[in-house]
Image (cartoon, grey):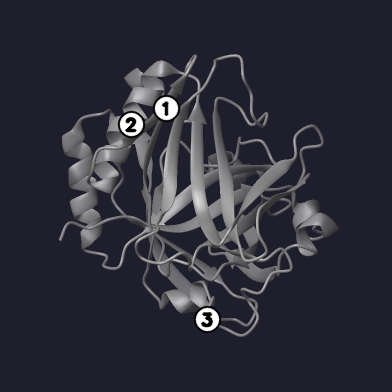
Amino acid sequence: MAPTPILDHIVILVPHEVLTNLPSWLTDAFTVLDGGRHADGVTENKLVLFQDGVYLEIIAFVPGQEEGRERHRWGRRSEGHIVDWANTLHNEEDLETIRSRVGAAKTGITYTSPTSGGRIRPDGTELKWIISSPVLDERKGGFVGGEAPFWCLDRTPRDLRVPYHVGGNTKHASGAVGVHRVTISVRDEGLFQTLKGTYDALQGQEGTRVGVDGDEAKFSWPLRTLEPVRGENSPGELVLVKIDPGYFPDGSGPVSVRLTLVSSTGDGYLAGHLGDGNWPIRFELVGST
């Protein structure tokens, strides 16, 4: 069977002072765990874990690490927004199959050879993983970030990095139990077509057109998680949307990543600021049944 992506985590970049003192709108809704400092010493994080095995990584640059930030993939991104998302796989050897599949699609996007990463947990446990990142041919303009997922595959047990089976780590006052939808919105028609072809290759299947409304076009693919909270026959959705060039859904720039969560308490939404005073982060909630 051809390997299929598994959603691993969603990255939210915040100022360091926000990371160390998260606002009550977030901590009242979610159980937040200390993550630790990454191996390069440039960033540290906190985590929100869900029952489906996916997590939110709330990450900040460590003060005094300006040079490291300048080199970092998210160093120039606006704080207070979702800036990226990651997939994983059951088997590390499947990554080469995925990389070859994307390369063969000839969309202009390729994936880098794996590089090592890691983090030290607050209890001193060392975590190790490998990362493979998307690269867009410079002739097509390069990436802002978040357009296509990066890959994060564990070299130490994933349960150490994502302890979602432990006690109350995944019990949230908001009722959130997992991810239902990841929506990527772009304005540029060329980038939209590039991503459509890339997502087809990543998923190993053609996206389903789910609507055209004015200047907006939309495709979707199944979104798989380690432990589906709606059952194996009800996967979530990865949605790619081409939006009106004049529409800015969250102020984050030419690419917007939005998240819809499954909640045991029914439909609703959560919203608040995480470092950008002009634009809140908003999580839509949909019922689990």
CA gap, disc 1 and disc 2: 14 Å
First in sequence: mark 1 vs mark 3: 3
Of the residues tagged 1 and 2, which is closer to the observer?
1
- Residue 120: % across, % down: 57, 73
Report the residue marked by disc 3: 165
Residue plotted at (64% across, 60% down) = 44
Q: Secondary structure at mark 1?
A: strand
Number of other residues with Cα within 10 Å of mark 3, as a class: few under 14, some 14 to 19, many 20 or more: some
Tell me the residue at 62%/66% (across/down): 264
Query: Does residue 136 show up?
Result: no
Q: Residue 94 occupies which quadrant of the picture?
A: bottom left
Amino acid type at circle 2 is Lys
Q: Where does residue 204 sit, x and y in percent of width and height?
A: 22, 46
Nearer-N-terminus badge (1/2): 2
Callout 1 touching callout 2 (CB < 8 Å) = no
Q: Which residue is mark 2?
A: 196
Q: Is residue 84 shown above or below 279?
A: below
Find residue 199 and name its label. Answer: none
Q: Indicate the quadrant where residue 276 lies.
A: top right
Q: Secondary structure at mark 2?
A: helix
Disc 3/disc 2 C-alpha distance (Å): 35 Å
Residue 147 can be seen in this image: yes
- Observer-nearest residue: 138 or 168? 168
Please tell me which of labels 3 and 2 falls first in the chain: 3
Q: Which residue is mark 1?
A: 211
x and y, in percent, of residue 148 in the image: 41, 40
- Could you tell me which residue is drawn at 60 percent across and 27 percent down? 253
